Image (cartoon, grey):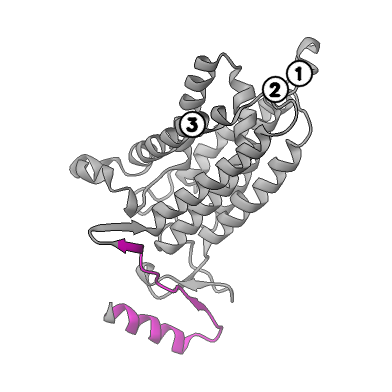
Amino acid sequence: MLDKAILVWLFLVGNQSPVWIHPQFDPIALSLGPVAIHWYGLMYLVGFMAGARLGLYRASQPLSGWKKEDVWDLLFFVALGVVIGGRLGYVFFYNFAFYVNRPIELFYLWSGGMSFHGGLLGVIVSLWWFASRRRRSFLSVADFLVPLCALGLGAGRIGNFINQELWGRVTDGSWGMVFPLAGPAPRHPSQLYEATLEGALLFAIVWIYSAKPRSPGRTSGVFLMGYALFRFLIEFVREPDSQLGYVLTGLSMGQLLCVPMLVIGAWLFFRIIPSSSDSRAEG
């Protein structure tokens, strides 16, 4: 750590513009004897509880068609889908060679390494399972869920920031931040960009849009398009994963995975729905 501190100091002495330095939080938020609670896991808990609170609120609205027990059951399946899908997605999309040689580290969730797109696939499977068991339409369940998700995504990005992972590219802007684990150069705090756009702003857009009855699938389409657009743009200032780099003509893996999201979201939003279904509000 001393050599890194010296490099940071030398860089700052010779730099004319002020920069921010990452606070270097302790990744462990709380220790209870042998049990350590990591900030990264705590952020997932915050996101889950925020989603639960919003889901219970939506279920309490007149004509929602949802009970509190339904919300808790749905969130249980979704949580499994997020964790299992997110971890497996990161392994297969971003770092397969590493985990093949260290399979035990697949279970080290506190160290980071989750893929949103993998988590999305896990959630889709969870939604299908829940909808089939409760005899609900898949899209009505998805439309109920997506307004609850964005705050959890924002909390996850705060966890990335605390962990000093998924930092941005080098910048000479006055808002640049030095992440000591990434070297002495100031970088875009892209985790905070994502927490703002994919978290707070996306939540506001989807929540406001879903306040009125919509045709099945349209709320899900807004969510998919919004996330894909914000993520695609932020990837231009986010450092690509070192083990992958750019995978196609200057585009990152994250950007490529956003393309099908954008296409499916646009199809859900703009598709022509038969008149017999137009009047049915989402569940």
**Residue density around tag 3, few if under 14, some if 14–19, many if 20 or more, within 10 Å:** many
Residue denoted by label 1: 280
Task: Write the start and end of the magenta stretch as one range.
Answer: 3-31
Image height check: is 72 above or below 44?
above
Q: Residue at x 71, y 44 (%)?
A: 205
Q: Nearer the viewer, mark 1 or mark 3?
A: 1
Dot 3: what SS? Answer: helix
Q: Is residue 22 left or right of residue 243?
A: right
Mark 3–mark 2 Cα distance, whole angstroms, equals 18 Å
The amino acid at mark 1 is Arg
**Residue density around tag 2, few if under 14, some if 14–19, many if 20 or more, within 10 Å:** many
Dot 1: what SS? Answer: loop
Residue 115, position as x, y percentages in the image: 43, 43
Mark 2–mark 1 Cα distance, whole angstroms, equals 7 Å
Residue 123: which numbered mark, if any?
Answer: 3
Name which quarter of the figure residue 195 lies in. bottom right
Residue denoted by label 2: 216
Q: Is residue 30 magenta?
A: yes
Instruction: Tell me which numbered mark, 2 or 1, is placed earlier along the sequence.
Output: 2
Q: Residue at x 60, y 49 (%)?
A: 198
Q: Is residue 257 magenta?
A: no
The amino acid at mark 2 is Pro
Instruction: Tell me which numbered mark, 1 or 3, is placed earlier along the sequence.
Output: 3
Q: Nearer the viewer, mark 2 or mark 1?
A: 1
The amino acid at mark 3 is Val
Q: Is residue 52 left or right of residue 240?
A: right
Q: Nearer the viewer, residue 98 or 199?
A: 199
Q: Nearer the viewer, residue 76 or 123?
A: 76
* Residue ranking furthest to the bottom: 13
Dot 2: what SS? Answer: loop
Name which quarter of the figure residue 32 lies in. bottom left
